[in-house]
Image: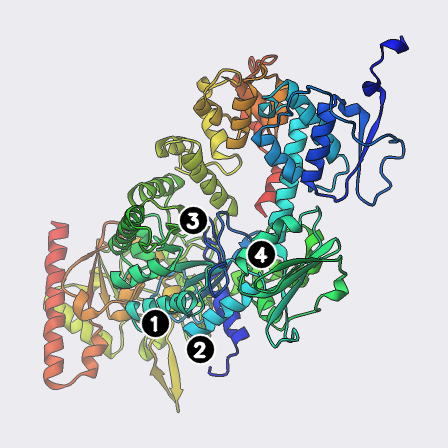
């Protein structure tokens, strides 16, 4: 084992980290290295430095400190009873690798997580040590996202927040029953307790910053979490409900969904099939509806079918519109922002453009076409100066008209 | 007729741009032209160094008309124009002038998002911002060890689509303030020595270093972070078009990763998840299926699967660890020494074994050969988890109200996690289907003990059985 090279360790520990969906590096406090000794900057939007063939952005060096773990969570490739290859970095090695990649402009920073070795506190200390080396010894001013361990001493989690731009704690599964069954070593109460601590620290640090210019920052990019979809029986309605409770209770920046995917050496307790990737996509769309389109969680749940799941063939916004056809058509020349945002096919940008343009002209269908991506999708749900959908909105086969054709769907789902 | 013509409206003008993205120069010229009342159709704008418009023959900008009103341009227009002028579209200067011309008469035109020319300037702005963003993302520095002064020096070769080099110098200075670096492009170069930024002449790819040892690590990372279970080539190409690939060290891996992905996924599924199919619908079907089960190596040991036995409507289900030597030969559970001990304790507690469904956590006998003897070996957590499928199938058919799990393996097969017997025993644990689980020691554990320790454990075992008996009476009452 001692003969593992950095490359071999990197391969093992990046491979072990790839089931984490999050790679965001946006929304932190702006900083740069102009008056510093080291390198690094963050300027609002994060940057995706590469894309893998799985379509996902590579923004951060996303690795585990070690994939040794004393926990036995069934959905996790690193669980104790899995016979995957194991490796372990020292904090110094991770810091060196981060800096070497950063200097060559491969990454925005580091996203560090870890299996639990020895104890939760020991592991958390090691994670914090990596951040300390980067921030204090090298004056690194790039992005750092630390996954914190809910079972660790709150003081260590606090330390992590002082170095990191973002901290996250995974809730793992949408229901407590699922957590008990699939992650027997974790407790929902402990996870939520840790999130509550982090929220409190973030609020306090923001408050102090208002009063004292030199007050230390605490996780300026906030906290996020991740849920695994499809490993237990939770329906989309359950998941959306859980996500909205989390947003409300802990002021999370993001809830990430990760479709349970077949992992090497999977536990026999897990379902045999992976859920369709499109389900994860639909959940993200519903997340968007709540965060940017003014939908209440209850309204998103109204878009689910009898089984509590969102339809896979059409997006949740269209599903909602088809269920509540009496709310349409919406007049693009008169309707308010909230109503326009409900029109399938109109995004936030298109709605802004409509609101700005209609001060200058009475919008015709042709004008709307220039402001949106697809007129065909929008047409049944709007009125314009020269357009009324008449019976189109009420047609029984409207769903079939608007749903993407099957072969397109297959391509997308791949 | 000719006498009525205003000579200024007849003359065509040509503006030769000295630099492709020189907004200040454009602004000066455009201001003069607007003040002189020259309409857009009479101005031609020529790219620097290009042949320009062959038909655009004319004079330089005229003197402004006396008492001309000041030229108006709002913030939105200036912000868009500063970016749009960096675009490689030769029409950009003329477009900007047309918009500036229209702005003098309709100051709020920028808000009309449905106007084709507004759409176009926004598109140019968007393209330039995207190109800048991709430059921030896809520039790849390579280390040049010796820069003549003994320090580290990093050099990148990049080919932007638009004239964005100078406009993005600030980003790299702010990010890499304490590093010496250069970015070389076909249209010019930037050099930062840690204190001063300077511009250099156009460069060629061969001027930049050809590699960096760190790229092997980066490629190793790129290949490992990719999840072959989710191939989305379209999504990748949308954000990282092929035109950028040639200057990024990791992209050489893409064809291989894509080709291997489908095969790797099917390997993962075959090796990782279980393809057990549908749950068997009868106990007999389970009995038949477990003989053929090779999901873990125990099934390969040359043994026989041992099915549970007992009435299908049993209220009590007893789960042991795995068949032993004698059970394997007999094909029935709990017939060896441990089984005999169990029978004695059950009888003492007043539980009729014949009314219980008795089975094992693991269906095959796991052993190592010591000479001719087959020595019992404990199943691993992984093997227990695999066999859980069968125990759960049995439980789904028998639907017992109470399950007695004897030993750590049986407890794990019921709970999916390892629990301590001493801590879990004596209290019921609710199962998801409403039934309850009781945990106790395995009788073979008693067999391994001697003296006082054995007596103590036998007493605890009896106490557990008594509690189960009492609970059974409550449940059937």
Name the one closer to the observer, A362 or A51: A362
Q: Where is mark 1, residue-wise?
A: A117
Tell me the crowding category of disc 3: few under 14, some 14 to 19, or many 20 or more residues within 10 angstroms, Cα based. many
Q: Are marks 3 and 4 in contact (CB under 8 Å)?
A: no
Q: Residue furthest bottom?
A: B371
Q: Secondary structure at mark 1?
A: loop
Q: Earlier in the sequence, mark 4 or mark 2?
A: 4
Q: Where is mark 4, residue-wise?
A: B172
Marks 4 and 2 sit apart, C-alpha to C-alpha, by 64 Å
Q: Where is mark 2, residue-wise?
A: B301
Q: Quadrant of residue B37?
A: top right
Q: Where is mark 3, residue-wise?
A: A256
Marks 3 and 4 sit apart, C-alpha to C-alpha, by 31 Å
Of badges 2 and 1, the one in the foreground is 1
Q: Residue furthest top?
A: B1
Q: Quadrant of residue B54?
A: top right
Left-right relation of A272 to B218: left
């Amino acid at each position: 084992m001692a003969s593992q090279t950095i490359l071999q360790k990197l391969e093992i520990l990046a491979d072990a980290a790839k089931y984490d969906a999050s790679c965001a590096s946006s929304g932190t406090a702006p900083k740069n290295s102009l008056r510093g000794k080291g390198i690094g900057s963050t300027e609002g939007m994060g940057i995706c430095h590469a894309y893998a063939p799985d379509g996902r952005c590579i923004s951060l060096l996303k690795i585990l400190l070690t994939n040794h773990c004393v926990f036995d969570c069934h959905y996790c490739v690193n669980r104790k009873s899995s016979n995957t290859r194991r490796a372990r970095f020292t904090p110094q090695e991770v810091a060196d690798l981060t800096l070497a990649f950063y200097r060559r402009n491969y990454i925005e920073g580091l996203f560090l997580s870890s299996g639990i070795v020895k104890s939760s506190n020991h592991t958390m200390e090691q994670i914090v040590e990596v951040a300390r080396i980067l921030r204090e010894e090298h004056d690194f001013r790039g992005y750092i996202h630390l996954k914190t361990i809910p079972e660790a001493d709150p003081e260590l989690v606090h330390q992590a927040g002082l170095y990191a731009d973002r901290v996250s704690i995974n809730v793992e599964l949408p229901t407590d029953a699922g957590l008990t069954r699939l992650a027997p070593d974790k407790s929902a109460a402990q996870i939520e307790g840790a999130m509550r601590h982090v929220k409190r620290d973030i609020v306090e640090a923001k408050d102090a910053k208002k009063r004292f210019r030199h007050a230390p920052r605490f996780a300026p990019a906030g906290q996020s979490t991740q849920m695994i979809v499809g490993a237990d029986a939770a329906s989309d309605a359950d998941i959306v409900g859980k996500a909205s409770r989390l947003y409300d209770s802990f002021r999370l920046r993001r809830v990430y969904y990760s479709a349970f995917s077949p992992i090497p050496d999977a536990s026999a307790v897990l379902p045999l099939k992976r859920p369709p990737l499109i389900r994860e996509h639909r959940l993200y769309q519903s997340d968007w509806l709540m965060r940017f389109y003014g939908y209440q969680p209850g309204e998103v749940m109204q878009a689910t079918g009898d089984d509590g799941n969102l339809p896979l063939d059409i997006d949740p916004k269209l599903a909602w519109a088809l269920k509540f056809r009496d709310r349409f058509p919406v007049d693009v020349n008169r309707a308010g922002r909230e109503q326009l945002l409900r029109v399938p096919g109109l995004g936030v940008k298109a709605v802004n453009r409509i609101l700005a343009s209609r001060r200058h002209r009475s919008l015709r269908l042709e004008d709307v076409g220039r402001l949106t991506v697809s007129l065909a999708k929008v047409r049944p749900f709007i009125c314009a100066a020269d357009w009324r959908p008449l019976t189109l909105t009420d047609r029984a086969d409207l769903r079939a008209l608007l749903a993407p054709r099957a072969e397109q769907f297959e391509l997308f789902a791949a | 007729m000719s006498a009525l013509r205003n000579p200024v409206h007849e003359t065509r003008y040509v503006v030769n741009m000295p630099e492709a993205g020189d907004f200040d120069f454009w602004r000066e010229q455009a201001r003069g032209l607007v003040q002189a009342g020259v309409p857009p159709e009479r101005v031609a704008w020529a790219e620097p160094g290009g042949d320009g418009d062959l038909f655009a023959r004319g004079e330089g900008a005229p003197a402004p008309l006396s008492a001309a009103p000041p030229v108006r341009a709002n913030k939105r227009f200036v912000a868009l124009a500063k970016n749009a002028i960096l675009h490689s579209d030769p029409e950009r200067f003329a477009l900007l002038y047309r918009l500036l011309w229209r702005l003098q008469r309709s100051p709020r035109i920028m808000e009309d998002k449905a106007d084709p020319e507004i759409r176009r300037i926004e598109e140019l702005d968007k393209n330039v911002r995207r190109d800048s963003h991709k430059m921030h993302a896809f520039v790849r520095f390579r280390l040049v060890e010796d820069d003549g002064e003994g320090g580290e020096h990093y050099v990148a070769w990049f080919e932007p689509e638009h004239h964005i080099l100078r406009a993005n110098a600030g980003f790299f200075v702010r990010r890499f303030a304490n590093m010496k670096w250069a970015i070389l492009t076909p249209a010019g170069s930037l050099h930062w020595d840690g204190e001063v930024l300077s511009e250099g002449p156009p460069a060629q790819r061969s001027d930049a270093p050809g590699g960096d040892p760190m790229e092997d690590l980066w490629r190793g990372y790129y290949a490992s972070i990719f999840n072959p279970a989710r191939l989305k080539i379209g999504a990748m190409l949308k954000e990282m078009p092929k035109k950028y690939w040639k200057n990024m060290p990791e992209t050489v891996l893409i064809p291989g990763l894509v080709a291997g992905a489908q095969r790797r996924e099917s390997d993962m599924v075959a090796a990782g998840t279980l393809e057990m199919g549908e749950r068997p619908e009868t106990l007999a079907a389970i009995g038949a299926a477990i003989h053929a089960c090779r999901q873990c190596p125990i099934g390969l040991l040359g043994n026989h699967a041992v099915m549970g036995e007992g009435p299908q409507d049993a209220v009590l289900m007893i789960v042991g660890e795995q068949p032993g030597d004698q059970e394997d030969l007999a094909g029935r559970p709990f017939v060896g020494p441990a089984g005999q001990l169990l029978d004695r304790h059950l009888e003492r507690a007043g539980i009729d074994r014949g009314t219980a469904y008795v089975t094992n956590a693991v269906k095959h006998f796991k052993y190592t050969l010591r000479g001719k003897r087959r020595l019992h070996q404990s199943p691993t957590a992984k093997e227990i988890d695999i066999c859980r499928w069968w125990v759960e199938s049995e439980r789904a058919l028998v639907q017992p109200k109470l399950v007695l799990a004897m030993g750590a393996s049986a407890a794990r097969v019921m709970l999916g996690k390892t629990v301590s017997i001493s801590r879990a025993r004596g209290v019921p644990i609710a199962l998801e289907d409403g039934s309850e689980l009781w945990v106790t020691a395995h009788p073979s554990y008693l067999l391994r003990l001697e003296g006082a320790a054995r007596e103590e454990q036998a007493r605890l075992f009896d106490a557990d059985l008594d509690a189960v008996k009492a609970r059974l009476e409550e449940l059937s009452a």
